[in-house]
Amino acid sequence: MKTTIMGSYPKIPAGPGPSVRTAIQRFEKGQISPEQLYSTYESVVKRVVDLAADAQCDRTTDGQIRWYDLFDPVVRDLDNVYSAGLLRLFDNNFYVRHPVVTGRLQYQGGTLAAWSREAASLSRIPVTIVLPGLFTFLSMVEDKNYHNEETLLSDLVDVMRLTVRHLADTGIVEVQWDEPALARYADRWPTAFVQEAYQKLLALEGLVLDLAHLVHEEAVALEKAGARYIQIDEPALSTRPEELDLAIEAMAIVTEGLTAKTISHICYGDFDTILPGLFELPVDQLDLEAANQNYALLDLLARHPWPQNKELALGVVDVHTHRIESVDEVKAGIRRALEIVPLNNLLIDPDCGLKTRTWDEATEKLRVMAQAVQAVREEEGLE
């Protein structure tokens, strides 16, 4: 069971510390500068995320401190829509500036991503961003352009998908759509109609490929900064064989045009279900764990010809046990791998990250691994 914060925090003065509402009033009167207003917002956002962390919550929102209302950040990021007069949000003591659509919705972006990045950078716990649900937006909108709800909804799905796509590199871990309209107007939209809209919004393929483009941009930036090796970890791939084709397509986007060596680390799953298709993953090197399963992976790999254009990085020390392997054990694993993969295509490493081990254990495991590799090199006449 986890604890989380689902929405907004107070903006009115309460106790010590800066007040957003007071700062806005002082700003509008010319009593404080834009920088001072910005600092107030930042301080209160920090107070919000610290409060949730101190309360030992597992998740928090940004408190919606910079927002006028639920629709505000979305409206700011779209063309041909603006916030108009206040309307009561159904039958509660909450008012919003309802959105008015004057032309076809176009996504421009920037505002919500910036606010989200700020919250994530200030928080000690993961941050959730709250967005207006598709049908809550429809229920409050004043449409001066489409005059057809289904057409408006179709474009709204597209711009919401772009909104989420541009949160991908902000540090946000979760997106929440608020849909009070679905309870208020239970008979207005058929269940199947609502489900179809959200299936389009949350379409796995579209989100994955959108994310792949963002990761590609990061990889290009890393390469420009001097990175010669770029590793894209995919530990879930071997547990979701039905999505292998999608993973291959996404990885092709990530690695397109890169000159750095590309690596994908995959571990702890059912490799039998993704071989030999895994060989099609467009990376230069597959980094696979083996020691944890007593090298059973090598038996699976031996059933298929190893692709000549790929390296294998083989995990030879188990990162989930306190036991220190012997040099002879590791040598035996390397020797088995050389029956499958040419010497020049084989690299040796731990199964995975060593963060679960003590410093002494990590040191000893790396020492054993290095000694085993050195022994094989000498036996092969490479030294």
Image (cartoon, rainbow, N blue to C red):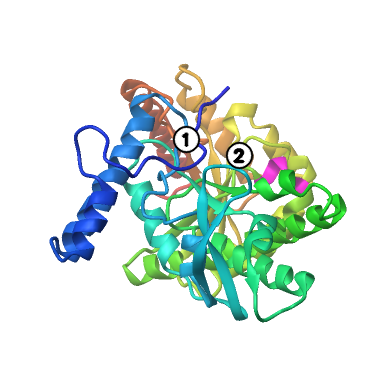
Location of residue 11 in the rendering, given as x and y in whole percent from the top left corner:
34, 44
Dot 1 surroundings within 10 Å: few (below 14), some, or many (20 or more)?
many
Q: Nearer the viewer, residue 343 or 129?
A: 129
Dot 2 surroundings within 10 Å: few (below 14), some, or many (20 or more)?
many
Verify whether residue 240 appears in magenta.
yes
Location of residue 259 in the rendering, given as x and y in whole percent from the top left corner:
46, 72
Disc on res. 267 = 2
- Left or right: where does residue 300 sit relative to residue 321? right
What secondary structure is found at the residue carrying circle 2?
A: loop
- Left or right: where does residue 185 sit relative to residue 66? right
Q: Is residue 281 visible?
A: no
Residue occupied by mark 1: 59
Residue at point 67%, 81% (across, down): 145
Looking at the magenta stretch, what is its main secondary structure?
A: helix
The disc, 1 or 2, on the residue closer to the chain's N-terminal end is 1
Q: Nearer the viewer, residue 365 or 7?
A: 7
Location of residue 192 in the rendering, given as x and y in whole percent from the top left corner:
86, 53
Q: Is residue 64 visible?
A: yes
Snapshot quadrant of residue 189: bottom right
Residue at point 43%, 36% (across, down): 375
Q: Which residues are magenta?
A: 237-241
Q: CA distance from mark 1 to mark 2?
A: 27 Å
**Quadrant of image for the N terminus:** top right
Snapshot quadrant of residue 333: top right
